[in-house]
Amino acid sequence: MKNRWLAVLLIVVNVVFLFADDKSTYLQLLQANKMQELKAHLEQWEKKSPDDPEMLIGYFNYYIKMASKETLVFGDENPPVRGTAMIITDPATGEKVGYLYGEVFYDRVNTEKALQVINKAIELYPDRLDMHFGKTRFLSLLKAYNEQKDYLLTLFAVGKNNDHQWKWSDGQVLENGKAFFVETLQTYIAEWMDSGNNVAFKCVQPVSEALIEYFPQSPIGYNDCGLYYAMSGDLQNAERYFLAGYQVAPSDDVILSNLACLYEITQDIEKAKKFYTLMARSSDRDAAAYAKQKLSELGR
């Protein structure tokens, strides 16, 4: 499957500033982990400009940093999906007994302060998509998947109301806010699918359905819904959504590949060949080569 990924960064970005201003100073202090100096700087900045959006974002990132703690965890089953883990063996037998890895958690007091300040910022600047996605990214880090899902669902109506005329850091207008919004939602969906967490996985279906409702001409929602049902073992509904996506975007390589794969699984080889044949005409060399290889395997 080709995942449509769009790397969504936290609000903090690495930027080279040509002169010292409040924002550049805050970023430098945050990146240097000089938290006492950063707090003092933010307090002075707040006195000058109590509703400055970049100052509010500064406080948000400050509280996230203060909330973040790391601890070593021993797991006797599977290693973490992301990050590295050390295999622990029984010194007597040499057999694997588990994994040792670092896990980040967030303390309640600073987490609440971070959410309070970003909520205030969003209330003042509802068109700032970096604030909305900063909040949803933090909810993801907290593993508060249902809260993340519920908040993302509210953003569909916000985007409809402002016609996706979103702004980003420093109030910069996003050139193609609608496409950016959809691609970022796809990023979250892909993360939920890959998380190995059942609560996260169940968030896929309602957000994918919302993508279909608000962006019916995009194949992304149909494909994600199809994948959700396929991964749940409901191949009938998977086929239904993939075919709906095919009607919307008949040359989409991801939809064609997933339909062909689905029919391969269900042993409907003629239909599998049909969609691999369509995919073999793709302008994407890799997709076309893959489809031709599959056709060869199926005895075209």
Image (cartoon, helix red, strand yellow):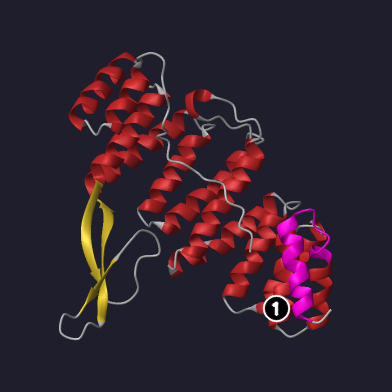
Task: Provide the secondary structure element on which disc 1 rests.
Answer: helix
Residue indicated by mark 1: 236
Q: Residue at x 63, y 78 (%)?
A: 234
Residue 109: give x, y in percent of width and height.
22, 45
Is residue 220 rendered to the left or right of residue 191?
right
Is residue 276 rendered to the left or right of residue 75?
right
- Is 175 inside the magenta-drawn segment? no
Residue 65 in view (yes/no): yes
Q: Nearer the viewer, residue 243 or 14?
A: 14
Q: Residue at x 43, y 36 (%)?
A: 11
Position of residue 232 relative to residue 290, above or below, is below
* Quadrant occupied by the C terminus: bottom right
Residue 191: give x, y in percent of width and height.
49, 58
Position of residue 210 relative to residue 165, above or below, is below
Is residue 141 rendered to the left or right of residue 68?
right
Count of number-bearing discs: 1
Residue 176: give x, y in percent of width and height.
66, 34
Give amino acid for label 1: Gln
- Image-quadrant location for residue 277: bottom right
Residue 108: give x, y in percent of width and height.
24, 49
Q: Nearer the viewer, residue 27 or 224?
A: 27
- Is 292 inside the magenta-drawn segment? yes
Dot 1: within a 10 Å radius of its alpha carbon, few (fewer than 14), some, or many (20 or more) residues? few
Q: Main secondary structure of the magenta part?
A: helix
Residue 50 in view (yes/no): no
Q: Which residues are magenta?
A: 278-298
Q: Residue at x 70, y 68 (%)?
A: 258
